[in-house]
Amino acid sequence: MTRPVIVWLRRDLRLADQSAFAAAAKSGPVIPVYVLDDETPRHRRMGGASRWWLHHSLASLAADLEKLGSRLVLKRGVAADVLADLARETGAAAVHCLRHYEPWWRNAEKALKAALPEGCTLERHDGNYLMPPGSVTTGSGQPYKIYTPFWRALAQHMPPGKPGAAPKVLDAPDVWPESDSLADWALLPTSPDWAKGFAEEWKPGEPGAADRLDAFLSRARLYEEQRNLPSREGTSRLSPHLHFGEISPATVWHATMDAGGSVETFLKELVWRDYAQNVIAQYPDYGKANARDGFDRFPWRDPSDEAVARDIKAWQQGRTGYPLVDAGMRQLWATGWMHNRVRMVAASFLIKHLLVDWRVGEQWFWDTLVDADYASNATNWQWTSGTGVDSNMFVRIMAPLTQSEKFDAAGYIRQWVPELAALSDSAIHDPESAGKFVKGYPRKIIGHKEARERALAAHATIKT
């Protein structure tokens, strides 16, 4: 009798171009397993928005597996222990998985390899990125720290290999192990259900990812021209599907690479995912530690201070008095996602206008984004704050009022800050300066000039 093999799933919830599934399907009966492990990541357990997405993505994958005569086994606990026990119970010959590079998953893979029973091997495969992190190096064999040379080096290896098809059938084991009920995991919010708007915006799962890619193809050639306009549907909105592995980056690359126009700008942003993984492979603590030591002395305002806490809450709730910032923060809360240009403006505002440590914002995004990715989230926040290995200079302070007008955000503001909807295009970016004081909308919590001067003075203290 052929021994079964286990496929350990994490952020790779698809069947097409999934090398762990492809290898397992050739080996014998396949037992797909997802382990909800909140203990191994510790403080990096998934946030609320990600858990909403996970519930629906797992439900979608389970339905797809059933069409192949298979099923999805759900377990909860420490992944290495659960999988080792399951391997003993089922007599599995191997555990197949895609490599993950978050520090806790790298540790879990080592622990699992040591815990598996004799005769059961851990088979790791690539497939979550365009190229395996660490494989693109300088002439001296060192990993890149700066994005632009990293992009140039990786581009020499593109396009990636053609994506593989989904298995047509997965042999089932003679006896299926017991599985948890997805509903019992209580991944969805109930009291209150703050995710009501998510379902209107998103369709988690592999079919939803394919639909999102198809919708983007018609405008991919205009990416450079439209990506910074929050009032337009110019971005791909593929980030949560890529994060949860519902579609492979190779699939996205091959589908878009011949779109023409300015599609290369989009491909460069797809490479940014690889770059971010390259960074955390070198700096596992990148989500909590400044890459530039000088910022360890930066005089951030104390979040425990009542006034600072009030400013942070105003930022979180989209009530800063800066319409573009407020629109972005409200879009985030309502949909679990925020337009990329607005993310930069909102992050810069927290860091430089409010002088709040970037890690406070990173943690808020971790809990509220459906695409909350450890590497990308940390890399983007450290880029904005000037603390990263490759980052914008701190003294380059984004002006949210100017950004709003420059990128024609009037329609975006009307959608997410409806109390300002009646204002003209000329007044809506900065109602206060236009003398338009709208009932229910707050005054600016700090003036731009005052905030800029305070930020520059704070930065000057660490230069000495």
Image (tube, rainbow, N blue to C red):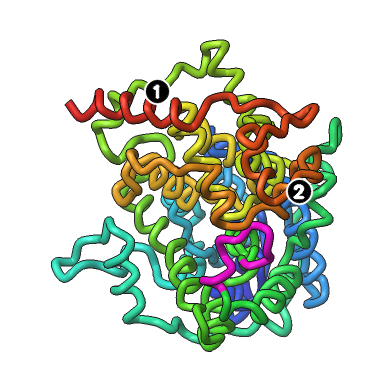
Which residue in the rendered view is the most extreme toward the top? 306
The answer to whether residue 177 shows anywhere in this view is yes
Instruction: Indicate the secondary structure of the residue bearing disc 2.
Output: helix
- State which region is magenta: 223-234
Q: Which amino acid does label 1 sit on?
A: Trp
Q: Which mark is residue 14?
A: none
Q: Main secondary structure of the magenta part?
A: loop
Q: Where is residue 312 in the image (x, y as percent from the top left)?
A: 58, 25
In the rendered structure, does residue 24 fall within the stretch colored magenta?
A: no
Q: Are marks 2 and 1 in contact (CB under 8 Å)?
A: no
Q: Which residue is drawn at 55% across and 48% down?
A: 343
The reply, left or right, for residue 107 in relation to residue 254 is left
Residue 63 in the image: state x and y as whole percent: 82, 67
x 71%, y 41%: residue: 330
Residue 300's tag is 1
In-front residue for pair 362/425: 425
Lower sequence index among marks 2 and 1: 1
Q: Could you tell me the amino acid type at mark 2?
A: Arg
Question: Can the viewer see residue 23 in this picture?
Answer: no
* Residue found at the far front of this picture: 435
Q: Residue 320: x, y in percent? A: 62, 30
Q: Is residue 228 magenta?
A: yes
Residue 228 horizontal/vertical position (percent):
56, 61
The structure residue drawn at horizontal position 28% and vertical position 58%, both measured from the top left corner, is 146
Rendered-image quadrant of the C terminus:
top left
Identify the residue position indicated by label 2 in the image. Answer: 414
Q: Residues within 10 Å of mark 2 (few under 14, many from 20)?
A: many
Q: How far apart are marks 2 and 1 (CA)?
A: 33 Å
Q: Is residue 218 above or below residue 228?
A: below
**In front here: 2 or 235?**
235
Q: Which picture quadrant has residue 172?
A: bottom right
